[in-house]
Amino acid sequence: MKSATICTFYGALLVLALVPVFAFGILPLGDMPNHLARAFILNSLGADPDLQKYYAIEWHFFSFQSTDFILPLLTKAFGLEMGARLFVAATFALLIGGTAALHRAWFGRVGLWPATATLFLFSFPFALGQISFLFSTGLSLLLFAAWIASMQRHGIVKVMLFSAASFALLLCHFFAFAAYALMLGIHALVLWRRERRWRDLIEAGLPFVLPGIVFLLSFGSEIHGRTFYGDLFAKAVSVLAATITYGTWPDVVVTIAVIVGLWFLHRRRRLSFVPEMRLPVLALVVAAIAMPRMMQGVLGADLRIPCLLGFLLVAASDVAFRSRRQALAFCAGVTAILLFRVVTLSDQWRIYDADYREFRAAASTLDRGSRVMVIPFDLGKTADRPRLPYWYMASFAVIDRSVFLPHLYTIATPLRFTGDRAANVSGSVPASPDWHPTTTAFAAANAEAIRQAGDVVLRMAPWDLVTNRIDWSDWPEQYDTLIDLDFGEAVNPAPALLTEIHRGSTFTMYRIHPPR
């Protein structure tokens, strides 16, 4: 096919993938409301006294992520919703462009095969709202493509350029940088073993000296939190991270379609693979298996490398189409699978969009600058829809009413809490959830009110998985409003301390008051 035809095909696929992104308001991606709230704070802190009571900004190494670099600029220039859409659009373009560029560096042409990367755009990390990682992964693919294309060039200028680019990638996202360093390092070792050219091996390692020094000096002080490996089911899900979004039946259809398509091409011996990438891919697979579910307070660490592998395997492989008919059949197949994904995802997002609008309407009644806590949904109960998009839904209250919300990310971000709230969200929790009132308004709390307060504390435990551990023991005195993500099963968790003020389809809002 002609180059213009191929470019048109890629452009059409990108536009198709972006249909749901531009069709709705706030994108229902797990962490996205949290990221948008932080972007709002970064943009508004200097002029908003309500925000200044609770939040501060401190820039450090490893606080820099592409989200904190780019999203505040986009939302300030284009508005909250459009800024988020443009960030996702840029991420999609980088992932597709990075895959195509890396493929061209190895095979000398782009062709049609890298279009398969569009089937991995709607991944589990995407559904989790890990756009910073995906954006940085696209950058890492482009950077690796530039390295492969410049392997015949040598000198200090090349080393300096790639040192600067590697350091920038580290600032954008540590996981993307680490994966890039691993695949480039193993690739360099494979070539050295074959050709025994020390100059090439040293030149491949020098760009990582500066990022390595920064990592050793800063990582431990900036990234801290819990680490756990996860169960077998969680690891099995992580293997399919490139084709799973919310774990519903469309994910099964797309996953099976991709597997069957690859099996068919392999059986017909149409697939080829870059030999020197076999060991780097194997190293990434081993790293993915060894990666914990949560590492130093970062949840979903084991989902990132499998997602990268989807794009890398496409970039490092090629398919020989023996006729125009076969090429057209491939184009039709990729388009059909992507269209199916877009249609089914849009159907899901309509529900989330309506629920987000309902919550924001209710949150508009909250007092500006008030303090809000959220009881997470019960992970053990089933619901009529995937609940991932609701995890940080309460972050809209920060955007709309400048409230204090202790669930905002402060790990690996420039966001900090001020005053007593910084100590209250410090990673140190009391041995007992017992509440001992210290203010006059709550001094009359009887044993029943204290018991009810303790029951609420026990329900807050899931937050410890995704944020700093928080001391909830005195929550009646620390917060003004409680939001329970009860999904329509509203039961007042502490009648002596709470009065219902709004009930929605997925949440109930309560005003916190002294015991009655």
Image (tube, grey):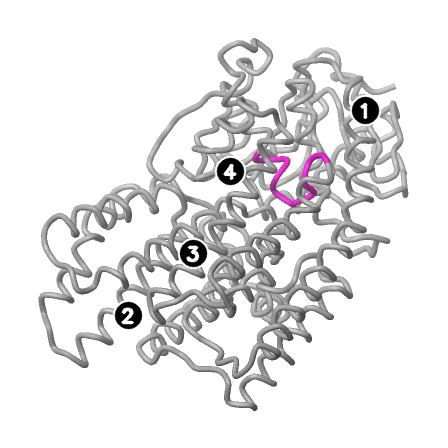
In this view, the residue in front, 204 or 219, is: 204
**Marked residue nearer the N-terminal end (1 or 4):** 1
Residue visible at 74% across and 53% down in the picture: 345
Label 3 and label 2: CA atoms lie apart by: 19 Å
Q: Which residues are magenta?
A: 25-35
**Marked residue nearer the N-terminal end (2 or 4):** 2
**Marked residue nearer the N-terminal end (3 or 2):** 3
- How many neighbours does mark 1 have within 10 angstroms: few (below 14), some (14-19), or many (20 or more)? few
In the image, is 488 to the left or to the right of 248? Answer: right
Residue 331 figure quarter: bottom right
Q: Which mark is residue 98?
A: 3
Label 2 with label 4: CB-CB less than 8 Å: no
User: How many numbered marks have been drawn onto this rendered protein structure?
Assistant: 4
Name the residue tied to disc 2. Answer: 186
Residue 317 figure quarter: bottom left
Q: Amino acid at mark 3?
A: Gly
Q: Amino acid at mark 4?
A: Ser
Q: Amino acid at mark 2?
A: Ile
Name the residue tied to disc 1. Answer: 361
Q: Position of residue 310 (x, y in %)?
A: 51, 67
Secondary structure under tag 3 reads: helix
Q: Amino acid at mark 1?
A: Ala
**Residue 26 sits inside the magenta stretch:** yes
Name the residue tied to disc 4. Answer: 428
- How many neighbours does mark 3 have within 10 angstroms: few (below 14), some (14-19), or many (20 or more)? many
